[in-house]
Image: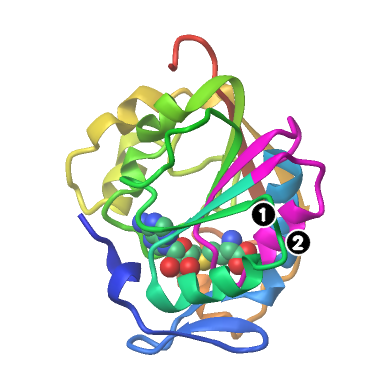
Amino acid sequence: MKGYAYGATYTVTADAIIDEATGWDVMSTWETPIMQKHADIVCANGGHILEFGFGMGISAGLIQEKDIESHTIIEINDGIYANLVEWAKDKPNVVAVKGDWYNDIPKDKKYDGIFYDGFGDMMNKRYFPTRIMEHCKVGTILTWYNNLLKEESQYDGDVKTMNRLHNGKALGDLEQFKSPERITYETVSLTIPDEARIKWYLEGSGNTYYAPKLIVDSDDI
Ligand SMILES: C[S@@+](CC[C@H](N)C(=O)[O-])C[C@H]1O[C@@H](n2cnc3c(N)ncnc32)[C@H](O)[C@@H]1O
């Protein structure tokens, strides 16, 4: 299954990625403090980091500042992937993968931290994190972009939230991770610009972003 981002035409400007078909801002520089928080969380173990969605490369650049061994990035969109390849030229620990995180995770290692930020991946997002467990070890840190502006995420909400997010479709194996007590949140204070078109996607209000963290345990893998 290929999601929306696969065939989208994205234009990257100085401060955003714009989806030409809808005019939506897929990623914007005002999200940098959010990306910093995800980079801090995902790199806390050091080691091998896996990232889904290159976008503007903001989180990727922040991850590169950390003391890590390798940094694998999977990107599905042709234009964005070309930017990733260019960006990675002087970064020897980066493994750039053209593909879908759902199918194309390199199997040569287990990862120490995984960050999922695949805006436009409405098809498969419900299979995160179950799908990636075979690439994890005990202690792997998972973090993902959270579009709920509260201490809750699409992976620990109630069934109503899930149904709303997934148009009432079967929840798949997401149910397995409905364990809110295992997900912790680190907050980021920021101002979401009024003109941010992505605001429709961020459910809730306020100026606090909640970055989720789930640490893989032996029962998960
Ligand atoms: C919001 S952007 C990522 C922003 C990035 N974290 C940054 O700091 O700039 C989402 C990215 O995910 C990519 N994407 C969407 N679905 C994907 C999938 N199934 N597999 C891999 N990448 C995907 C999009 O093409 C886009 O580049």
Q: How many marks?
A: 2
Q: Which mark is residue 209?
A: 1
- Closer to the camera: disc 2 or disc 1? 2
**Helix, strand or loop for disc 1:** strand
Q: Is residue 183 magenta?
A: no
Q: How many C-alpha atoms fall within 10 Å of the one at disc 2: few (<14), some, or many (≥20)?
A: some
Occupied quadrant, residue 138: top right
Mark 2 or 1 closer to N-term? Answer: 2
Residue range highlighted in magenta: 43-70
Q: Is residue 32 visible?
A: yes
x, y percentage for residue 110? 53, 28
What crowding class fits label 1: few (fewer than 14 Cα within 10 Å), some (14-19), or many (20 or more)?
many
Whether ligand 1 has any atom under 8 Å from the Cβ at mark 1 is answered as no
Residue at point 30%, 49% (across, down): 124
Q: Which residue shows up at 35% across the image and 48% down it?
A: 125
Residue 207 visible? The answer is: no
User: Horizontally, is 119 left or right of 55 in the view?
Assistant: left
* Near-viewer residue (210 or 54): 54
Q: Position of residue 26 (x, y in %)?
A: 49, 74
- 116 horizontally vs 167: left or right: right
Q: Position of residue 180 (x, y in %)?
A: 51, 26
Residue 17 drawn at (x, y percent): 53, 81
Taking the spot 39% from the left edge, 70% from the top edge, the residue there is: 77
- Amino acid type at image mark 2: Pro
With respect to residue 182, does 25 lie above or below?
A: below
> Which residue does the numbered mark 2 point to in the structure image?
33
